Image (cartoon, rainbow, N blue to C red):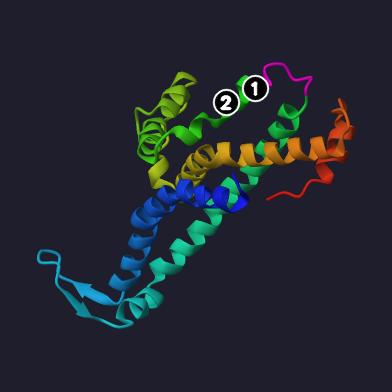
Amino acid sequence: MGIKNRQKWAYVYLAPYFLVFALFSMFPIIYTFWLSFNHMQPLTGDLTWAGLTHYRRMLESRFFYESIWNTILIWLMSIIPQLTIAYTISLLLSNKWVRGRFWLRNIYYFPNLVVPVTIGLLFGALFSYPGGSINQVLNLFGWDSVHFSQDPMLARMAIAIAIMWRNFALTLSSLLRGLILFQRRSMKPPRLTAVHLGRRSHGLPCP
């Protein structure tokens, strides 16, 4: 089979992904952008042109700027520990002297297979008040239950933990693939000391 024929078959195999992406991701984005310039009647679905009215209202609302600040805080609270922990674990799992590293790689990828709805239910059960799992542990030690949703910082921390848990598998697998490829290209045996691990990881570009 020639190179051109293989390229044609590659496009055929990739076509279902692009179709699903266009239908369930690209179209909703474009349609939502169009709706932002219109008023919609909730019952009939009729649209009337509104221009930039919604955007002016958004920029004049303090809730918009609060949401941006909350997004930045939650992003920092989730991405920094996520990259730190994933990078450390990927350094360990990329070495041959770690026993059971193939099983551990599969276990760490498990959170990525859980749908977002299930994650919401799981963390809702963990942080709920007053009978959540975390509050039950606190009660065992004689501490009062904590209402996570009533405290802004605790609520941000709970959301950041959920985001970190959801995206941890992809971050770990990306870093692990980079380390393995770096190890193969260097054609050197894996080092066992922390100093050599630090030297090897220092030369690896992080995403």
Kindly identify the amino acid type of the residue bearing the numbered disc 1.
Phe
Kindly identify the amino acid type of the residue bearing the numbered disc 2.
Asn
Task: Kindly identify which numbered label has been placed on residue 80.
Answer: none
Q: CA distance from mark 2 to mark 1?
A: 7 Å
- Residue at screen point 69% across, 31% down: 89
Task: Kindly identify which numbered label has been placed on residue 106.
Answer: 2
Callout 1: helix, strand or loop? Answer: helix
- Queried whether the magenta region covers residue 111, the answer comes back as no
For this view, does 84 lie left or right of residue 72? right
Number of marks drawn: 2
Residue 142 image offset from top left, x and y in percent = 47, 22
Residue 179 image offset from top left, x and y in percent = 75, 38
Q: Nearer the viewer, residue 19 or 121?
A: 19
- Residue at screen point 62% across, 37% down: 173
Q: Nearer the viewer, residue 60 or 206?
A: 206
Callout 2: helix, strand or loop? Answer: helix
